[in-house]
Image (spheres, rainbow, N blue to C red):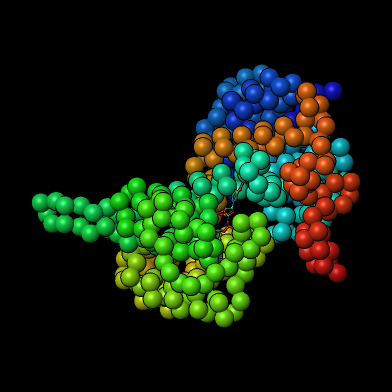
Amino acid sequence: MAVKLGVPKETAAGECRVALVPAVAAQLMAKGLEVRMQPGAGAGAFFADGDYHDVRMVEEPADLYREADVLLRVQPPTPEEIDLLGPETAVLGFLDPLGDPERVARLRDRGVTAFAMELVPRIARAQAMDALSSQASIAGYKAALLAADLAPRFFPMLTTAAGTVRPAKVLVLGAGVAGLQAIATAHRLGASVFAYDVRPETREQAASLGATFLNLDVSGSAEGGYARELTAEEKRREQELLGEQIAGMDVVITTAAVPGRPAPVLVREAEVTAMRPGSVIVDLAAETGGNCECTVLDETVRHEGVMIHGPRNVPGRLPVHASEMYARNLANFLDLLVEDGHWGPDWEDEVVAKTVLTRNGEIVPDAVRERVEGGAS
Ligand code: NAD
């Protein structure tokens, strides 16, 4: 039996992305898969039902969930949606494995085979499936535009008959995937860009995109290319040294994250107060607690004349390209699960083995299982 994919309309508030775009749906059908969608699933990303040629539209979400072998999602399913899944169903999407133990436990208890795109290992072979990266690069680009839009100043240097404008000074904190894209975008807009990250290996990457890397002498690389949580003394030193730099910036874009931990605080209230009125902070870590002490999720707050923006779901603000890139990530991952149109994951494959979250009534990754079971006791 050919694998049947189901693509529901996303139900999370404000989510405009869709897990499958027409071009990728056509590629998957050419490989022998069947595709079913909920009408209007692509509308938020400007894809009409009619763009999905030969895709069967299933009006009732309950029918779609029941008939699908593999559900493709952007956001994690709600408890009610999980209860529509049977043990024969697989679900593939962002599942927030470390952020919501109750949801993971529910997926386990339903016997669902769940793959969390956050868990795709960051190795060269899996780059084409790396949805964290594809969505983070979109967020970084948009963060620079949001900052430019909020700023009461130009980003570029301008020489005009009405005088010369100096370029805005933009500091990007965290030079991972999102930070590097924010650096590149702010640089293209003509700003004078500075960057900092605890991983020293980001220095050259940031410099190659036009940023001046700040020398703070605090280093925190960990396994897998990620940062580790700093010690209390390292945090104090980082904040102290950063504080001196922040006061001179027109714009600060923060993107710092440590997997599975609340976002590190890099900009305290005192640093915000020290910035010039009219300065702007865009905090891309707002959803995980914020890199700035003054951030309020989903709001733009003013603190002594400084505007602090804490946006939610930034990739969702570019739903066309975010959906296209995400759908390609999913399709590339599906190649490891489906052979000649039939379900046949290679459970020994490193990418499959590390991405599976729940299977046969078990939580697979140790770190997630410990968190869920630790929280439950
Ligand atoms: P992330 O979203 O977890 O973190 C963003 C950045 O914040 C990181 O660069 C991190 O070092 C930085 N950070 C954390 N704590 C900080 C602090 N206290 N002060 C300053 N900066 C801090 O990371 P990400 O962008 O998803 O990825 C991190 C890295 O993983 C990438 O830059 C890359 O090196 C690696 N990666 C590898 C692959 C691959 O090989 N396939 C794919 C993607 C990413």
Q: Residue at horizontal 65%, vertical 56%? A: 224
Residue at the limit of the structure toward the right, as seen here: 360
Q: Position of residue 218 (x, y in %)?
A: 52, 72
Q: Is residue 35 visible?
A: yes
Q: Position of residue 60 (x, y in %)?
A: 73, 32
Q: Quadrant of the C terminus?
A: bottom right
Q: Quadrant of the N terminus?
A: top right
Q: Residue at horizontal 34%, vertical 67%? A: 249
Q: Is residue 28 left or right of residue 291?
A: right
Q: Nearer the viewer, residue 68 or 233?
A: 233
Q: Is residue 245 left or right of residue 225?
A: left
Q: Image quadrant of residue 329?
A: top right
Q: Position of residue 40 (x, y in %)?
A: 61, 32
Q: Is residue 60 above or below residue 212?
A: above
Q: How many discs mark residues in the rendered view?
A: 0
Q: Is residue 211 above or below residue 356?
A: below
Q: Nearer the viewer, residue 254 or 101?
A: 254
Q: Is residue 305 visible?
A: no
Q: Image quadrant of residue 206?
A: bottom left
Q: Nearer the viewer, residue 341 or 292?
A: 341
Q: Quadrant of ligand 1?
A: bottom right
Q: Residue at horizontal 75%, vertical 35%? A: 336
Q: Residue at horizontal 56%, vertical 34%? A: 324
Residue at the limit of the structure toward the left, as seen here: 161
Q: Position of residue 303 (x, y in %)?
A: 40, 72
